[in-house]
Image (cartoon, coloured by chain):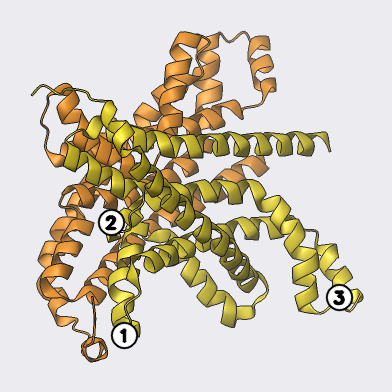
Amino acid sequence: MIYSFDFSILIKYLPALLRGLMITLEVSAVSILAGIVLGFLLAIARQFGGPWLATPAMAIVEFVRGVPVLIQIFWVFFCLPAIIGMDIGSTLSAALALTLFMGAISSESFRAAFATIDKDQYDATVALGMPMRVTMLYVILPQALIRATPTLLSNAITVFKESAIVSAVGMADIMFVGRNISSASGHPIEILTVVAAAYFIVAWPMTLLVGNLERRRLERMSAA
Amino acid sequence: MRLDLNTHMLEQLNLHFISAASGRLLGGLLVTLELSAIVMVVSTFAGFAVAILVMSPFRLLRLPVRAYIEVFRCTPALVQIVWFFYCVPVLFNVFWEPFTMAVMALSLNLTAYNAEAYRAAIQSIPKLHSDASVALGLNRWHFNRYVVFPQALRLALPVLVTNTIGMIQQSALVALVAVEDLMYVTKSIASSTYRPVEIYTVAALIYFAIAFTLSRVVALIERRNRQLMERA
């Protein structure tokens, strides 16, 4: 079979691919932000929640991390509606599954960050008579957030890449659009390479940033 | 899609049909395990070779390998798999079975991640060991063979297993390009029986059991590594 390259079709389909990219970025951004909040709550539940909160939180984290995200998306898309008796659509189920995933992997990052916060600080908040809520929001969260930033960023990259599977439940992200166009136009090489390049252009600079942040932190640690 | 009969459907969670479907599920599981095992073995060795290449002093060797690693780490596995399935046959005029294509795509992906694990481990060996080896009169090869690699392999091992767990989960993606793995079988049973809840839950539990077992192995290796470090 002789494949004839035709890069001019890229111009024709570029707007559609860009719309797909916007949807990819939107669903990733929403899931990442909601996932960070969820991850913080899960980490607090595991660290300070007592057995009644810690055990279910741990079970959720272990389960979500141990099951392919593709199955989770299908589960939310096909099974959740059957259980709650309500149709939730592909966008919401995709965002829900990705949020859960981001929450689970980020709770580990927060837990690692909590471990670096000095024990004396907890004693100090008790001595100052701070309520739990104030301690968490104004003492623990800001420090944990700063220390967890590199790992949270790399989790965000993971979620961004993982978001390609929302195409499997029919959400029109860049992967979905790319696959459709490549089968409709018969030019998979041009289109799919552009799709891959789009992911790369977003993810690579972020990976470099994470590498930089981590190197700087290592230097600071070895300097101290 | 309206699901009016849902509460009714849930009242009779039918676990009976799971046993009827267990033969097909097992077949799918075997494909997933076979696929993962091949990819794991290939990438464990290839990752090491790629790590050596990426640390090469020759720029002409280093840069293309670096580019390969970055491209595979910075694009979704699904894009890589789909790209492979659509483009490789056309580009190289070859027609492999879906299983072979899946092995190649996932191996390229995991090799890139494993190479980074090996590189990080090798570079974490302190400079002092190099000085000590020079003092002991070890040549470059003996230094690598008896000082760097044994320590680096031990350090890299937990990361390699963690990467492998990730790959097994990513392997579910090959269902989307018609490799008949556990995910594929699950999907087809779910749509032919209209019982998604039971079958997806069972499949999730199977994947979880694999990942959980391997993650215990990681914890075990890490504990042993820590003990060895403390003794040293």
| Residue receiving disc 3 | A126
User: What label does residue A168 carry, if any?
Assistant: 2
Query: In this view of the protein, which residue sits in the foreground, A160 or B95?
Result: A160
Percent across and percent down for residue A199 are 43, 39
Q: Quadrant of the N terminus of chain B?
A: bottom left
Mark 3: few/some/many CA within 10 Å (<14, 14-19, 20+): few
Does B26 appear above or below B218? below
The quarter of the image holding the C terminus of chain B is top right
Residue B153 appears in view = no
Identify the residue at horizontal 19%, vertical 63% (top origin): B187
Foreground tag (1 vs 3) = 1
Query: Crowdedness of circle 1 by 10 Å Cα count: few (<14), some, many (20+)?
Result: some
Say what secondary structure mark 2 lies in.
helix
Name the kind of residue labelled 3 in the image: Val
| Disc 1: which residue | A85
- Chain that is orange in the image: B
Provide residue A208's location: percent of width, then percent of height: 58, 33
Q: In percent of the image, x 54 and y 76: which residue is there?
A: A55
